[in-house]
Image (cartoon, helix red, strand yellow):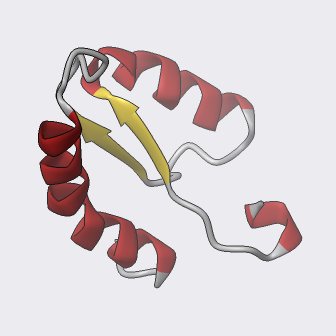
Amino acid sequence: MENAGIPSATICTDRFIPTAAGMAKMWGAPDYPTIFTEHPIENLSREALRARAEELAPKVVRVLTGEG
């Protein structure tokens, strides 16, 4: 998406910090901003997942606007 000029944000759980860093480096963007949240998320209720998303939303906005 970024290569097409469309701002994007990557969100991963913290279990994938090394993987995300490796992928960013492999794609030639070692400083690519990735947003991390606590692992795991698959067992969260709908309400808990919504709360997590609301917590991450400001970070997503900062990444999309180039401030993060």
* Horizontal side of residue 9 vs 40, given as left or right: right
The residue lying furthest to the right in this view is 4
Q: Residue placed at 29% from the left, 39% from the top?
A: 36
Placement of the N terminus among the 4 image quadrants: bottom right
The answer to whether 9 is drawn above or below residue 19 in the figure is below
* Horizontal side of residue 4 vs 19, given as left or right: right
Placement of the C terminus among the 4 image quadrants: bottom left
The answer to whether 38 is drawn above or below residue 53 in the figure is above
Q: Residue placed at 31% from the left, 17% from the top?
A: 42
Numbered-mark total: 0
The answer to whether 22 is drawn above or below residue 12 in the figure is above
Q: Residue placed at 60% from the left, 63% from the top?
A: 8
* Horizontal side of residue 17 vs 33, given as left or right: left
Please state the horizontal and vertical placement of residue 49, each as a whole percent of the image.
22, 40
The answer to whether 61 is drawn above or below residue 23 in the figure is below
Please state the horizontal and vertical placement of residue 50, each as a whole percent of the image.
22, 50
Q: Tell me where residue 45 sits by quadrant.
A: top left
Please state the horizontal and vertical placement of residue 13, each as a whole percent of the image.
32, 27
Q: Residue placed at 24% from the left, 72% from the top?
A: 58
The residue lying furthest to the front in this view is 46
